[in-house]
Amino acid sequence: MSKTTLAVKVNYKVISRVKKFCKERGIKYGFFVEKALEERLEREELKEDLLDLKTLRGKEKEAILFDEYLKKRRV
């Protein structure tokens, strides 16, 4: 996987905590930040999926079988 640089402004206290955390545990700073971003993205995407599920659950009664849908598409 190729890598790139991401430059963002972050509160000094947050960066200090992250660097201290990584140093104490022997974790590379870049690895930690990358994994944190991935985890946050996954969480946000899951929240969106759950909201879609909740929204569409009421329409489940209107659903038809996939085979029926395909038959209608062929006509």
Image (spheres, helix red, strand yellow):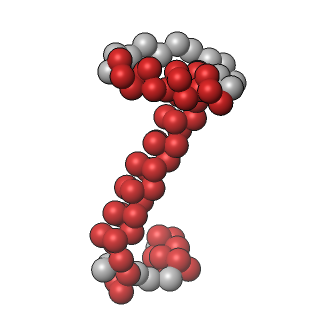
Q: How many marks?
A: 0
Specify whether residue 71 is in view: no
Residue 2 spot, x, y in % from top left: 66, 19
Report whether 58 appears left or right of 15. Answer: left
**Residue under the image location 39 percent in, 56 percent down:** 47
Could you say which quadrant of the image residue 10 lies in? Answer: top left
Position of the N terminus, as image quadrant, is top right
**Residue under the image location 34 percent in, 63 percent down:** 51
Residue, far front: 24
| Nearer to the camera, 72 or 4 | 4
Report whether 53 appears left or right of 18. Answer: left
Residue 21 spot, x, y in % from top left: 55, 29
Residue 46 spot, x, y in % from top left: 45, 56
| Nearer to the camera, 64 or 38 | 38
Compared to 9, does 66 lie above or below?
A: below
Compared to 9, does 67 lie above or below?
A: below
**Residue under the image location 43 percent in, 13 percent down:** 7
Report whether 42 appears left or right of 55. Answer: right
**Residue under the image location 36 percent in, 63 percent down:** 52
Compared to 28, does 58 lie above or below?
A: below
Specify whether residue 48 is in view: yes
Compared to 53, does 64 lie above or below?
A: below
